Image (spheres, helix red, strand yellow):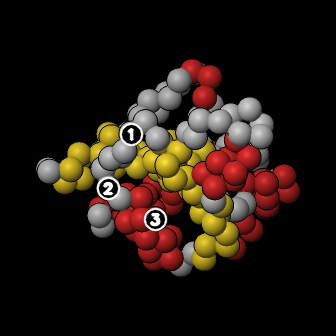
Amino acid sequence: MRFYIFWFLLLTTQPIFAEPMPEDAGVLYIYQVKAEIADVKQALEMAITNQGLLISNTLHISEMLNRTGTELGFPTPIYQQAEAFEFCSALLAHKMAQLHPANIAICPLTISFYRPTTNTDTVYIAFRKINLIGTTAKDLSKTIETLLQNIITEAIDSL
């Protein structure tokens, strides 16, 4: 299995690194930044809308996990805060569907951001690698991943 590690040095006073994934974690891209989570959230919102995209939903992941954790046998919170934005591009959705109807399962696109309880000064931003079905799926998958990377880079640059 290949591991993707992105190293970004965006500001000389604030290096940003991607976190390597364990072998069993699947394929995710993870960025980290030392910032307040409210600032990261706002920066991501702006970067998404700057791409002409509309956030269709905000998932309040840590609230759900904290609310249900004790009852399900997980009393120790993992996150101080964890949320995810869902959004999609009509153009990309059409292109994905043209390649193969099942590709619609990729929409909406999701970017998650979280601060674990074990690290109080770092916010992590993550998204899933895109693997579309179809003869020219590799090119469109790369286009979508580049869009997600650009959104995150713009957000981090603005902090």
| Mark in the foreground, 2 or 1 | 1
Residue matched to label 1: 119
Sequence order check: which comes first, mark 1 or mark 3?
3
Helix, strand or loop at mark 3: helix
Q: Is residue 11 above or below residue 51?
A: above
Residue type, mark 3 in image? Lys
Residue type, mark 1 in image? Asn
Q: Is residue 7 above or below residue 40?
A: above
Residue 70: which numbered mark, if any?
none
Q: Is residue 142 visible?
A: no
Asked if residue 73 lies left or right of residue 79, the reply is: right
Label 2 – label 1 distance at C-alpha = 12 Å
- Name the residue rendered at 67%, 73% in the picture: 56
- Name the residue rendered at 21%, 50% in the picture: 14
Given residues 36 and 96, the one toward you in this image is 36
Residue matched to label 3: 41
Q: How busy is the neighbourhood of tag 3: few (under 14 within 10 Å), some, or many (20 plus)?
A: many
Q: Is residue 93 visible?
A: yes
Residue type, mark 2 in image? Ala
Helix, strand or loop at mark 2: loop
| Mark in the foreground, 1 or 3 | 1
Labelled pair 2, 1 in contact (Cβ < 8 Å): no
